[in-house]
Image: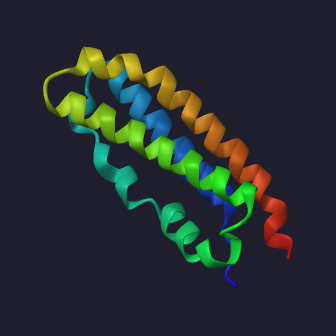
Amino acid sequence: MKRIDIDAAIRSHNQWRRQFLNAFAGGDYVDMPLSEHRSCLLSLQLGRLRERHAGDAVYQALLAADERFHDLANEVIELSNNGMASTADLLLPELNEAAHQLIAQLDAFRPLQQD
């Protein structure tokens, strides 16, 4: 079984989140590749592990955290693309918290890869 590079996943999500938050703070979010998160490699890797870890609560929590992060990011992008940047701004603290939760779930998943 190929292992997930958890440190790389954490780095990529953190980097994207920081760029995203900085772009919104500076008001130049239109210049940022907002949809970049839609090509998340972690989501693909987690999908490959579904059969092996389907009944595992830690895996399920990680899936849910990743999905929540990307759902919020999609909502922020949709709002900003529809001229509702001020409404999108209100979701940024929630997106930030979702990123922290995702990282916590990635850390919790580490021991499962030792099998």
On the image, the x and y values in percent for residue 65 come to 58, 45
Q: Is residue 113 left or right of residue 106?
A: right
Which residue occupies the foreground of this view, 78 or 14?
78
Q: Where 87 sits versus 66, above or below?
A: above
Q: Can residue 33 be seen in this snapshot? A: no
What residue do we see at 26% from left, 14% from top?
86
Q: Nearer the viewer, residue 7 or 56?
A: 56
Question: Horizontal placement of 69 versus 85: left or right?
Answer: right
Does residue 34 lie above or below 29 as drawn?
below
The quadrant the N terminus occupies is: bottom right
Q: Position of residue 45 (x, y in %)?
A: 55, 70
Quadrant of the drawing holding the C terminus: bottom right
Q: Which residue is rendered at x = 35% and y = 28% of the image?
A: 23
How many numbered tags mark residues here?
A: 0
Say whether residue 76 is left or right of residue 102: left
Q: Where is residue 59? Give x, y as percent.
A: 69, 60
On screen, residue 67 above or below 31: below
Location of residue 81 (image quadrant): top left
Q: Is residue 70 visible?
A: yes
Residue extending farthest front: 55
Q: Residue at x 27, y 36 (%)?
A: 77
Colouring scheme applied when the structure was drawn: rainbow
Q: Position of residue 10 (x, y in %)?
A: 63, 50
Q: Residue at x 69, y 78 (%)?
A: 52
Q: Residue furthest bottom?
A: 1
